[in-house]
Amino acid sequence: MAEIQYQGRLHHLQKELMAEYYAALTASAHGSGVPAAYLLIGGNPVELLRAFDILPVFPEVNALQIAVKKQSLPYIQAAEFMGYSSDNCAYVKADIGLYFAGRKTPFATIPEPSLLLCNYVGCNVYMDWFGHLAEYTGRPTFQLDIPFIRTQAGAPSKGDVEYVMRQLERLVERCEEITGRKLDEDRLRESVRLSSLTGELWSKIKHLTKHAPAPYDAYFDSVTMMAPLYCLRGTAQGLAFFETAYAEMTERVAAGQGPLEAERFRFVIEGPPPWPHLRTFRDMFTRWNAVAVASTYSTVGGLWEFGFTHDPDRPMESIACHLLEWNLTNRNFLQRYQQIERYLSEWQAHALVIHSVKSCRLFSAGQGDMREYFAKLGVPTLLIESDLEDPRYFSEAQMRNRIDAFFESAGHRSIAQGAAL
Amino acid sequence: MQMPVIEEHLEEIVERCVQAIETQGFPDAESWKRAVPGRAIVGCFPVYSPVEVFHAAGMLPVGLCGGGNRMEIAHADSRFQSFVCSIVKSTLEQGMTGVLADFDALVFHSICDPARNLASVYRRNFPGKKIEYIHFPQNFEAPEATVYLVREYARVAESMSELTGRSVRAEDLQASIDTYDAVRRLVRQLYAVRSDTPHLLSTRELYSLVRYGYLVPPEEHLEVLTRALAALSERQGRPRDRVRAILVGSFCEQPPIDLIGAIEDAGCYLVDDDFLIGRRWFVGDVSRRSSDPYLALAQSYMDASVSTPVKHDLRVSKSAALVERARRHSADAVIVLCAKFCEPALFEYPLYRRALQDAGIPHIFLEFEEKMWMFDRTRTEIETFVESLLFA
Ligand code: SF4
Ligand code: SF4
């Protein structure tokens, strides 16, 4: 089955911008003098770093780039040789392997950190990861502790927000020490303003997949947009990218274009992608003319489509709220069920695919319960397992069989019921 | 040699504890609850739980320790995948098979992602139980973290009070802290005896005495420990030629008691460990830290608690702390015994390994599962390790 590979302006612009971003990292590694801070994707205060001209480095993005290029295994094995377990998150192992291999990748040389900013937003592995980097690099570390969403109210308390804001003030002091500069409030407001516009556009783009056909695949094509969303958020280039993206996607809606020859199945997908086998995995859905109209993975770093925007008039507070409440990683597992339910109804999807990855227990631990919940609601639900970084956990034939069987039975069901699915 | 009568007493005490531990279900807690209307039971998932707060609200905090090696997992493994540790599944299984039917509340903590998701799964599947989740602060350099933690304790206190109708007054909390402080003091004494004279108190015995406290009110535990210490003071014996080792990695899911016995029998004196570390969390008395009991608890957590893989205190290197501990206990070796699939434990190992190698302290790495019941392999591995040390 032929797939209409999405290769518009957007795709080229993404490549260009990411190349520039990585060139800046390489320059920093080679002594450009621009300090670099490592931080994590799950809700993060990148806007604050922008105000100090500190380069954000995302070890998760580096790890996934390596995996997409099918180069993660030797790094993972090098880390396992150091004593890391086959059961530890492979993002961490790939990153540690890379660190000891001199931090050189085909796309950039990763600079040493001037600051290890561990934004503990949900994932407990983050703290192990950055704790280890702290021991290996001996560089200063800032642990930004974000209380998890844990009450029935499903929102942070006033005290939680205050606690995070006090820590952000301390982070500002730390950045002032590193750069020798005072915080420029105007620059902070400006980068928060750019983030707020970027977030609004990203949210609009996400709502466009409510159209049938969906103008793009909200899993496989969203990841193209997620790199700039994280690496360039809070900059003018980042905003320009999303202006282009939005324009292009609305054109596609107007023209009735989608990523497939003919959209047949609309599904929601939960869990991160199998980066080392992304293409193969995508083809497994394409051959069924199945499109993801929403994905939970595209909300790890921010959940804009449900109404959040940064606020330049309250820069610190809105950063705190982003970290605490408006991203997938800091929300509890049941809030994810609710998120998926909203996608199923508002985006008019008829099936749920759960991609359970061994590395990331934040996502995966308990997905059997999630399957049970949605199956009881009558939503056709498929649970498949592999990994996001370690190529050894992808069993292609088995995966294909499961996906084929799923859509085959979904197809029969739609004939029997005369339904859309 | 004639055994002194008193020594048998310690064995009896220990045997009673072992029996209670190996009994399926929680009969002691259930009869405690039935004795007086209005009482409630809260199950505390590992690792550390602020039991004083629950006790002060009129509850019996029961320590959850998984299903051991006698429980078959028949339902929970369809909810949690094969790569998730056993205690998460066995704890869910306990709920699904009615073992926790008399429990009014369960509390989970920010120790790892599977335990956290388990809290959510419980909340959905057991709407009749109160499910609390405590986020412990991980920024140990910010004074605001203590303020946050005081609020967090007050929040769960209020929540639990809804079950018993008894709000937690400062004096109640103070009294509960005093009781648990007294228990912890005795446990520290027992640990000191074992480190100084490991031939007089085995780890199997010590473990059983401490774990008994997971099942009964602290007042009763205190009494048992007091009697155990008295009996112990009469014990005599001669040290044997064994390796002094400290054991780390088993801070959450617990190995079967017989596995602990097998490790000792393979030629080790375990002179320190992190079994059941949640009830031995503080290095000194909590009540000394402040006259405000909430503040005392929170400050103790932040500044006077043990180093474990589930606490990320950047002021202390965990691997350096391990080396220091090994030296403090004059240990010849370290046994890293991790629960299978336990990410926090497994993550510590590369750093431990590096630090131990640098310090010239031999170590062995092993994995266990609570449900295992054959120990020959572990025993042989430890024997080989011990021989390599004794005859090096
Ligand atoms: S466990 Fe998941 S969220 Fe955490 S570092 Fe690994 S991949 Fe990222
Ligand atoms: S055994 Fe380890 S992974 Fe399992 S719940 Fe305990 S800390 Fe988490």
Image (cartoon, coloured by chain):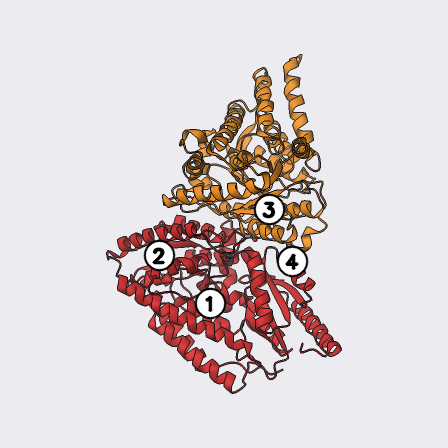
Chain colours: A red, B orange
3 or 4: mark nearer the eye: 3
The quadrant of the image that shows the N terminus of chain B is top right
Q: Which element is circle 4 on?
A: helix
Q: Which element is circle 3 on?
A: strand
**Picture coordinates of residue A360 (x, y %)?**
54, 57
N-terminal of the pair, mark 4 or mark 1, is 1
Chain ID of residue with mark 2: A
Q: Which mark is residue A307?
A: 1
Q: Which element is circle 2 on?
A: loop
N-terminal of the pair, mark 1 or mark 2, is 2
Q: Which residue has dot 3 on it?
A: B130
Which amino acid, mark 2? Pro
**Picture coordinates of residue A177 (x, y %)?**
27, 53
Residue B110 versus residue A20 in the image, above or below: above
Res. A330 visible in picture: yes
Residues at marks 1 and 2, common chain?
A: yes
Residues at marks 4 and 1, common chain?
A: yes
4 or 1: mark nearer the eye: 1
Q: Quadrant of residue B21?
A: top right
Alpha carbon distance from label 3 to label 4: 22 Å
Which amino acid, mark 1? Gly
Chain ID of residue with mark 3: B
Q: Which residue has dot 4 on it?
A: A368
- Residue furthest right in the image: A416
Q: Which residue has dot 2 on it?
A: A113
Q: Quadrant of residue B255?
A: top right
Residues at marks 3 and 1, common chain?
A: no
Alpha carbon distance from label 4 to label 1: 29 Å
**Picture coordinates of residue A310 (x, y %)?**
39, 65
Which amino acid, mark 4? Gly
